[in-house]
Amino acid sequence: MSDFSLHPQLEADCHWVGRLENCQILLHHNAGVPWYIVVPETEAGELHEMGMTERGDLDWVTDAMARFIKHHHGSDRINLGAIGNRVPQLHIHVIGRSEGDPCWPEAVWGHLPEGPAWSETAVEAIRQQAPVEA
């Protein structure tokens, strides 16, 4: 999709990590939990509006990111969410959770305290190790 652009709120809240199978991969600024956001380059606003091939690619990317989070961050659980109430652009939250994280066992929304930001060094290391293209 040549005219694709990220919603300004996603740009403001996240680091850009890379692209994978026509999806943008972002990392939320709050390093309290490993919180990634997969943004498919689509005009669809909801999961059920995607075509089968497009949806299959998104599912594959989401699974790849879940495996990366478990391996790279050592997370016990992976939480997925496609809410879109504040940001209408279709995006999937892929969040690594572990017992003892700052909001365990509650959901991150409304429970994650302001935390440390990812350092540029950490973000660059993630870019090098994540399953993404530059």
Image (tube, helix red, strand yellow):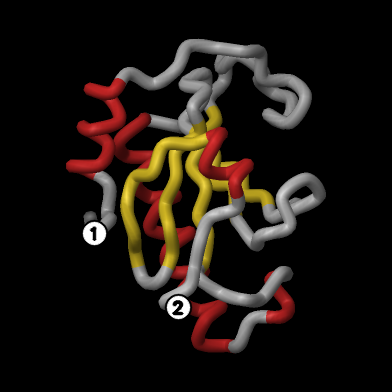
In this rendered view, identify the residue nearer to me: 6 or 32: 6
**In this view of the protein, can residue 76 be seen by the observer?**
no
Name the image quarter holding residue 10: top right
Above or below residue 1? Residue 95 is above
The structure residue drawn at horizontal position 64% and vertical position 81%, both measured from the top left corner, is 50
Q: Which residue is mark 2?
A: 1
Badge 1 element: loop
**How many other residues sit within 10 Å of disc 1, few (<14), some (14-19) or many (≥20)?**
few
- What label sits on residue 58 in the rendered view? none
Query: Residue 42: percent from the left, percent from the top?
Result: 56, 74
The residue nearer to you, when weighing 59 against 98, is 59
Q: What is the residue that sits farthest to the front in this orientation?
A: 3
Query: Of discs 1 and 2, which sits in the foreground?
Result: 2
Q: Which mark is residue 133?
A: 1
Looking at marks 1 and 2 on the same chain, the residue that comes earlier in the sequence is marked by 2
Q: Quarter of the image holding residue 63?
A: bottom left
Q: Residue 130 appears at what percent x and percent y?
A: 27, 47
Q: Amino acid at mark 2?
A: Met
Which x, y percent locates residue 1?
45, 78
Q: Callout 2: helix, strand or loop?
A: loop
Quarter of the figure with the C terminus: bottom left
Please report the residue visible at 52 percent of the width from the left and 42 percent of the height from the top: 11
